[in-house]
Amino acid sequence: MRLIDGNAIAKEVLAEIKAEVAALAPVVPHVAFVRVGEDPASVSYVAKKQATAAEVGMRASLRVFPADVPKAELMAHLDALNADPAVHGILVQAPLPPHLPETEVFNRVAPAKDVDGFGTESIGRLVQEMPGAFAACTPRGVVELLRRSGVRTAGKHAVVVGRSLIVGKPAAALLLAKGCDCTVTVAHSRTADLPSVTRQADILVAAIGKPRFITADMVKPGAVVIDVGINRVPDASKKSGFRIVGDVDFDAVAPACEAITPVPGGVGPMTVAMLMRNTLDACKRALGRG
Ligand code: GUN
């Protein structure tokens, strides 16, 4: 079993980005974050993204709205960010409160600034395999982890468990696209006999959002397992009262794998690194250097 070290690979990616950012001076790539409400996981993710932007020499701004912000107010803020030439990327942290329909909000972000890759145009470009499409950060991180850790993907059967807009759907599109060339199956909560499907995977991408959902009997020996899950489970021994576990029952699954990502320290840091990559690309394109 080989552990795929997301922290080390993300560090490598961020060093490359930092050098490219420095070369753009005096222009500073700027990513604008929008957070609605105080969901503790969202607070922590956005803070991490802001800190990483600073590390690579980018500008990060943050606007926080109360959970009951009227839709029109949020949309007006997005319009202002869209119109601001000093802003290169815009990210509205999900999940949003129920009165704010996520797809409608994501679609309000100008396609040229859609560094999250959740808008209609970004998704369309991704599926069309247009060069320069903004791919969603977590799926892009998954593919980059596979590539940089030397996992061969062409002709392999990739099974993605989860069909979210944020991970499952774009991950399937990326794994299917030329360059990855996987045979792709997307499974989800209504899939019949899920273990028989996941056991076919050469590459298993777990993006379900349920702690330790993928058990040893669901994984083929020799598979490569990418665990996208970030779940908080109660842990009285921690100061915070919780600890983070993935969607994969790591201790049981890992021994039979060819390679596996840990949680934390697997996909998570790559998501953040890919956001920086998308923001840098958006900035370069705005400058006509993309
Ligand atoms: N919530 C969980 N992951 C993501 C992400 O990649 N982008 C945004 N905007 N929200 C998220």
Image (cartoon, grey):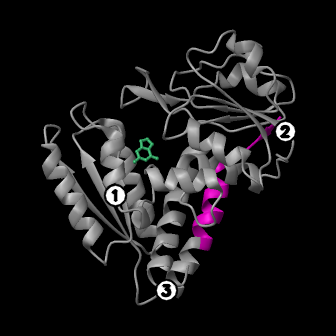
The answer for how far apart the CA atoms under marks 2 and 3 are is: 39 Å
Q: Residue at x 25, y 30 (%)?
A: 98
Cβ atoms at labels 2 and 3 below 8 Å apart:
no
Secondary element under disc 1, as helix, strand or loop, is: loop
Magenta stretch encompasses residue 2: yes
Residue at (75%, 56%) from the top-left corner?
148
Q: Which residue is disc 2 drawn over?
A: 156
Q: Secondary structure at mark 3?
A: loop
182 on left or right of 99: right
Identify the amino acid type marked 1.
Answer: Val
User: In the rendered structure, does residue 83 fall within the stretch colored magenta?
Assistant: no
**What kind of element bears circle 2?**
loop
From this view, report whether residue 29 is shown above or below residue 272: below
Residue 203 lies in quadrant = top right
Q: Position of residue 75 (x, y in %)?
A: 21, 53
Determine the image quadrant of residue 228.
top right
